[in-house]
């Protein structure tokens, strides 16, 4: 017998469907399949696998577009701004040093955050049933 709220495919295997949007987003942000949490989501840096080998979810349906890049830039900017202001206000570095530090931090943080941001966006599109994804089975509200 299938447990209420569980995906029927999940009941036949050992993986567990996410129970909330934040669980699906957490899985996607850690490069895990948002549906099963078992297999990797990305085949390459920003290229999701076509189909999850564990739960058979089709990931070609996502349309993340530029939103992950906006998120990565927004978050890295909020991390960088206090650091740059602290370094610049105390004149700890010459101007060229501050420029090298700023460009290096911007590139490093943005590239580091881009894949997790895309994973979160894909996971939330999956959870909310956007762009061709079917709504996943969800636990019943009390
Ligand atoms: Zn999966």
Image (cartoon, rainbow, N blue to C red):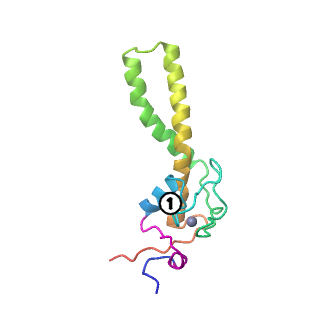
Q: Quadrant of ligand 1?
A: bottom right
Q: Which residues are magenta?
A: 8-20
Residue sitting at x 44%, y 31%: 80
Q: Which residue is mark 1?
A: 124
Position of the C terminus by quadrant:
bottom left
Instruction: Write the residue at 50% across / 52% down.
Output: 29
Residue 84 can be seen, yes or no: yes
Q: Residue at x 50, y 17 (%)?
A: 97
Q: Is residue 18 magenta?
A: yes
**Residue 88 position within the rendered picture, expressed as x and y whole percent measured from the top left:** 41, 19
Q: Is mark 1 within 8 Å of ligand 1?
A: no
Q: Quadrant of residue 33?
A: bottom right
Residue lying at the far left in this picture: please name it. 142
17 or 94, nearer to the observer: 17
Q: Position of residue 59 (x, y in %)?
A: 62, 62
Image location of residue 107, percent across then percent down: 56, 33
- Comparing 37 with 82, the one in front is 37
**Residue 64 picture quarter:** bottom right
Magenta span includes 26:
no
Q: Is residue 120 visible?
A: no
Residue at left offset 50%, top offset 25%: 102
Give left or right: position of 30 versus 42. Answer: left
Give the side of residue 84 with respect to residue 99, left or right.
left
Q: Vertical placement of 101 versus 65: above or below?
A: above
Q: Position of residue 45 (x, y in %)?
A: 62, 47
- Most common secondary structure along the magenta stretch: loop
């Amino acid at each position: 017998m299938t447990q209420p709220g569980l995906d029927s495919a999940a009941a036949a295997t050992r993986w567990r469907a996410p129970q909330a949007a934040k669980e699906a987003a957490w899985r996607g942000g850690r490069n895990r399949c948002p549906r099963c949490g078992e297999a990797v989501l990305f085949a390459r840096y920003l290229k999701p696998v076509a189909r999850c080998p564990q739960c058979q979810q089709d990931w070609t349906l996502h349309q993340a577009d530029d939103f992950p890049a906006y998120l990565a830039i927004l978050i890295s900017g909020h991390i960088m701004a206090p650091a740059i202001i602290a370094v610049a206000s105390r004149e700890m570095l010459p101007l060229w040093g501050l420029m090298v530090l700023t460009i290096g931090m911007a590139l490093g943080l943005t590239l580091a955050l881009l894949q997790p941001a895309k994973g979160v966006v894909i996971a939330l599109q999956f959870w909310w049933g956007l762009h061709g994804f079917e709504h996943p089975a969800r636990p019943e509200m009390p």
